[in-house]
Image (cartoon, rainbow, N blue to C red):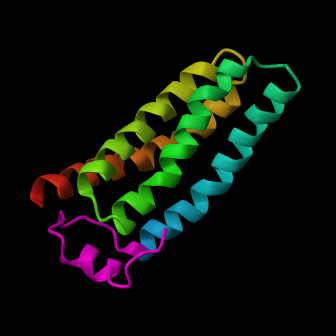
Amino acid sequence: MMFSPDWLQWYDALQKPSWTPPPATIGLIWQVLYPIIAVSFGFVLIQILRKKLPWRTGLPFMINLIANLAFTPLQFGLQNLNLALIDIVIVWATILWCMATVWHQVRWVAWAQLPYLAWVTIATTLQTLIWLKN
């Protein structure tokens, strides 16, 4: 999906809470989180392929990845605050589902999701407030 060249201008024009991090900070946070997500989600996938975890264990991880990847096109490509809010709530809920699904089998994967959950909780709160203000 191609983003309109004015996506940053559109985003800057939105009414946001005073504590909204600048886009560069948000990008930096994701640069830290994506390796954690890749390693932990990748481990789960490998364990599923090796049949050490049931395939159902991977379901929340797949839904989470799809929803995570969909957020940017929804928010900045379509500039649709409604769909972006629904999407980020799905991301948040599936992180909890991921953690619960692997807790008894691979506890470190559940623990590894805590920074992701913390950031997405903040981002969901931010997205909700942006949605309400606009």
Residue situated in front as seen by the camera: 70 or 104:
70
**Among the 4 quarters of the image, the one containing residue 13:** bottom left
The C terminus lies in quadrant:
bottom left
Magenta-colored stretch includes residue 128: no
**Among the 4 quarters of the image, the one containing residue 33:** bottom right
Left or right: where 73 falls relative to 6: right
Left or right: where 19 falls relative to 121: left
Q: Main secondary structure of the magenta part?
A: loop
Residue situated in front as seen by the camera: 57 or 40:
57
Residue placed furthest toward the front: 1
**Coordinates of residue 113 in the picture (x, y in percent):** 57, 39
Q: In this view, does 101 lie above or below 29?
A: above
**Coordinates of residue 87 in the picture (x, y in percent):** 38, 45
Q: In this view, does 106 lie above or below 38?
A: above
Magenta-colored stretch includes residue 20: yes
Task: Please report the bounds of the magenta region as a residue range.
Answer: 1-23
Q: Is residue 103 above or below residue 32?
A: above
Please name the residue shown 27% across and 73% down the image.
11
Q: In this view, does 85 lie above or below 89?
A: below
Please name the residue shown 38% across and 58% down the image.
74
**Among the 4 quarters of the image, the one containing residue 71:** bottom left
Please name the residue shown 27% across and 59% down the image.
80
